[in-house]
Image (tube, helix red, strand yellow):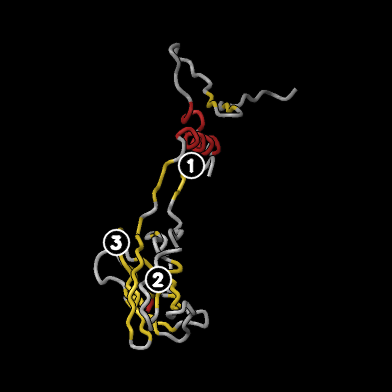
Amino acid sequence: MAGSPFLFLFLSGVAIGQQAETAPRLQNGASIQLMEGEGAINSIRLHRGHEPKVRVTDHEAKPISGAAVTFVLPATGPSASFGDSGLSITVMTDERGEAVGRGLRPNGIPGQFRIRVTTSWHDSPVVATLVQTNAEPVIHVGHSKTIALIVLIAGAAGGGAAAALGKSGSSGQSATPAVQTAPGTIISGNPTLGPPH
C-alpha cells in the first residue's frame, strides 16, 4: 500500500495450475481430476491453507457420486493437518463427483509437500498427488522518508519536535529544520507568543 510505513507482502495462497493433470483412467475404473489446491502456497503466519478439491469420474468421464476419497498428508517435515481429523481425512463425493479435504491448516515448517489422494471404483484403486508449499510472509520496510516523517509528526505532537528535528548550526544558534516531502512541506519550531495588543 503506497504511503504505509511497513508494507507486508505475503503470498495470499492463490492456487497455481488448478487445471492440473488427471490420474490415469482405467478401462472400468475411476479417474481423479485435481480441481483446486495444486501448487497452492499456504501462509504459516496466518495459519491459512488451501483445501484440496478433486473430482472423481468414471471411464466415460461422468462424475461418480458416493465414492470414498481419502486425502493423506506427510507425517514429518513441511505438512499440514485437517483440523481434528489429523493427517488424513476421508470424504464422499457429491453429485458432481467432487470431494474436498476441508480444514487444511499448514504446520510451522516451510517447504514443499505432497498430498496423496486415493479412491476406488469397482475394486480399481486410483491415486493422485497434489503439491503445496508452506511459506512465511515476506516483510519489506517502507520508504525511509515516510517512516522518518511519521516519527517526526509523532514527536511534534508530544512537544518534542525541537529535540527530534533541531540541530545546532555552525554559529551555535538553533536552526529551524524542515522535512521536505512531496507534495508539501512540514516546518517545525517553537511558537512565539507576545503580550495582547
Query: Which label is found at residue 5?
Result: 1
Residue 75 drawn at (x, y percent)? 25, 72
Name the one closer to the observer, 128 or 60.
Answer: 60
Query: Which label is found at residue 104?
Result: 2
Q: Are marks 2 and 3 in contact (CB under 8 Å)?
A: no
Discs 1/2, front = 2
| Residue visible at 40% across and 64% down in the picture | 38
Secondary structure of residue under mark 1 = loop
| Residue visible at 48% across and 15% down in the picture | 173
Callout 2, which amino acid? Leu
- Asked where in the image residue 27 lies, by quadrant, the reply is bottom left
Query: Which label is found at residue 109?
Result: 3
Callout 1, which amino acid? Pro
Q: Earlier in the sequence, mark 2 or mark 3?
A: 2
Q: Relative to 4, say whether 183 is above or below.
A: above
Distance from the alpha carbon under mark 3 to that under mark 1: 29 Å
